[in-house]
Each structure stands twice: as C-alpha cells, then as structure tokens.
Image (cartoon, rainbow, N blue to C red):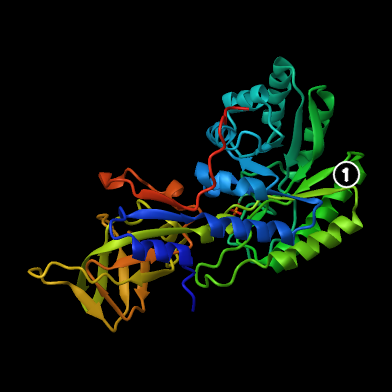
Amino acid sequence: MSNGAPAAVLDHVRRSPDLPLPAYITDHAGLATWAAAVRAALPSQVELLYAAKANPDPDVLRCLAPHVDGFEVASGGELSHAAAAVPTAPLSFGGPGKSEAELALAADRGVHRLHVESERELHLLTGLAAAAGRPIDVLLRVNAPLHVPGAALAMGGGPTPFGLDPSRLDAAARLVAASPWLRLRGLHLHLASGLDAAGCALVAQQAVRWALDWARRTDNRLEELNLGGGMAVDYADPAARFDWPAYGQTLTDLVRRHPGLRLKVEPGRSLTAYAGCYVTTVLDVKRSYGRAFAVLAGGTHHLRTPAARGHDQPCTVVPIETWPADLPRPAVAGEPVTLVGQLCTPRDVLARDVPLPALRAGDLVVFTMAGAYSWNISHTAFLMHPAPAFVHLQRTPRPSGAGLR
Ligand SMILES: *Cc1c(COP(=O)(O)O)cnc(C)c1O
C-alpha cells in the first residue's frame, strides 16, 4: 500500500544532508494540484472555502488562494491572521464561542459572511453593526435534525453546543429581519466530519430539502446554504482520497434542481492533509519485553494528530548510511516497530507496530498526511523541546505590497 509520500518531499529529504530536523515539509506544487482538482470537481455555482483552522500557515493560505472562493476563519485570531496573509480573499467568520471583541472586530473590518451560532451573537451584532455603520451578511448555523450516517465527529442532529437549535431558528431569523444592519443570506449546516462522499451526498440532499422547506414555511429567502466541511481523510489508506467528482455530481444535480440556491462547502482536512510531511530522525532503537521501539527526535508535541485521533500516522523510512565508525548502531530488522517521540508519556506514539524491513538509529522517518490539524493542534510547550523547522517546497511567491484589507 502507498504511504502517500509526495515525490518532491522524498527527493528533497534525500538530497539535503543538512536538512534541519525535525521538520515539516510542505509540497506546494502537490497542494496546488490537489486544490485545483477539488475545485474542478465542483460545479461553478458551488463556492469552495478553505477552513483555515486545519492549517493556517500563511504560505498554505497563499497557495490555496487562487483555487478557493474564500476562507472560513473560526476566531478573531484567525480573522486577523487570514486578513494579513490573503488580504484580498473573502473571509467567512464562524465558530461556536465568539466574544464581543471578536464580533466587534468582524463588524469593524467587515467580513464576507458571519456564521451566527446563537441569539446572543445576534443581539450583540445588531449594536456592533450599527456602530460600525456597515451591514453584515449572516448565515444562521443550525443544528438541523438530519441523519448523519457513520460520521467520525458528529456536530449536529443531536445535542451539541454548535449552532442554533432548530426550535430557535425562527426567532433568530426574526432578530436578523428586525435589524437594518443585518442581512440574512441563508443557513449554515456543518453537521459532521469524517464522512465519505456517499455520506456527504446524503447529508447535502437532506440539508437542501430541510433548508428550503424551512424557508418556505417561514417565508424567509434562502439564497445560500453552506454545507460545511468534514470530508473524510483515511489515514489507514493514503491513496483512498475523498471522491470529490462523485460529491461534485451530487452538488451539480442539486444546483440544477434549485437554480436560485448558492451552495458552499468549507473543507479543511481533506484539502491540506496530503501536502504536508513531518520528517525526523531515529535517535534510538530498543527492545522492551519482546517488542521493538524506535525513539524519534520530536514526537506528538509536534504532530499530535495520531494521538488526538487514535490512528497510526502513515510513514516511510529514508535509510541513512552515515554513522560514526566507533559508535555501536542500535537497529532492528524483520519485525514491527513502534515509533515514539521524546516525551515522558506512553501516549507519545506516532505509529504502532509498523511493519518496516529494518530501522536503525540515524535513519530518517517521513510521516505523511501531516498537512492538517498537525503542528497547530499540538501541545508544543510540553517538555520544552525546540520547535521543528518549516520547509516550503515550490512556495507561491508572497505578493508585494500586501497589507491589511
Ligand atoms: C472544522 C470545521 C470545518 C472543517 O472541517 P474539516 O473536517 O477539516 O473539513 C468546516 N466548517 C466548520 C464550521 C468547522 O468547524
């Protein structure tokens, strides 16, 4: 089975004996190609936003900018950050716990869309938008009662802190209608993550039906429906990517049937996971009660993804022949090896029982599918190890004269 390592990253690792390690290496050409393929699989009437929380690296945002219709940000911090990194891109501001200061920031600088999660937010926004003297276009995020089959993380269709309960949706729409500064553009229904294309298609069809029915019943205009993100990434099979053409076909059928409705999707993980690798070196190899362990430089304080999700991070080994002649070289061959980091906790495991032909201290391990929810979700201060290096292969040039919008 493929380990999903981008050829550009492996080439770079093999040709760079002085590569600072551990390092995150981003394959920008691969990222741009994949984002273009995702965009091409969607009908032109469907907007593609990137959920910046998956990987907000400014170079990643700039690489994606030509291929997406905008970015979804989930905090005031991400809002300011994205506005600086991709100053001309439309920003949609979501997230379940917005402070008054964050809402004021959105009102003052202007956002393309504000995804409202509660009536409290609407009460605050009414005053803030009036004070800023600028209308705000909102989508109401609703925890719609839809069936979400086989999701890894369910965020709707049952009790959750996300979005408005369906029973409060009409009251929220009336609050929007009562304010001259707020404009209701439609609804937002991010209900789950980890769905394959068939699951996403089923959710999209139900969501469109439910949203249009709500609009008809309550006499609200529904121009837009944001279907959220959550497209599955299978870490056990790097070659099996989310079937964007199949999902795109479902969305094509939906926009044909409902020509006045603008659909939006906002994937994070499924756009950037494949373009990032975490590369490090084997410090030590040892056996413990009959099992082989390799202790790597770095660990889950750099790449928390496998610990957070409970998976084995896919990887491949780049053998290194250089080793001091006077130093015995710890090694293991012909048996599964568990790859761990430098932290003093048994949870610092990147991959368990990996069937490698051989592994020696000094060899390099390239962890693949590390481009989403990786560095930025890690507990980086634990044990005070240094941060990894960040390497961007074929990075998109930074536009000159970029400033805040
Ligand atoms: C996290 C999130 C996304 C992106 O989810 P992925 O699983 O990374 O695709 C999109 N929309 C909302 C509202 C989110 O919270």
Q: Is residue 330 above or below residue 31?
A: below
Crowding near the residue tagged with mark 1, few <14, some 14–19, many ≥20 C-alpha atoms within 10 Å: some
Residue 402 position (above or below residue 371) = above
- Disc 1 within 8 angstroms of ligand 1 (CB): no
Q: Residue at x 10, y 68 (%)?
A: 327
Label 1 secondary element: helix
Q: Is residue 401 left or right of residue 42?
A: left
Side (left or right) of 126 relative to 103? right
- Picture residue at 75% right of the left edge, 58% below the top: 42
How many marks on residues?
A: 1
x, y percent for residue 385: 27, 47
Give whichever of 262, 24 is nearer the camera: 24
Q: Residue 390: where, in percent of width, then height? A: 40, 49
- Residue 334 at least partly seen: yes
Residue at x-position 37% and y-position 52%: 302
In this rendering, the answer to whether 264 lies above or below 282 is above
Give the quarter of the figure containing the C terminus.
top right
Which of 313/192 is in front?
313
Single out the residue that lies furthest toward the left: 326
Instruction: Write down the residue under mark 1.
Output: 215
Q: Determine if residue 193 is in view.
A: no
Percent coordinates x, y for residue 216 in the rendering: 92, 45
Residue 45: give x, y in percent of width and height.
82, 51
Residue 157, quarter of the rendered image: bottom right
The amino acid type found where label 1 is placed reads Ala
Considering every residue shown, the one lying at the far top of the view is: 131
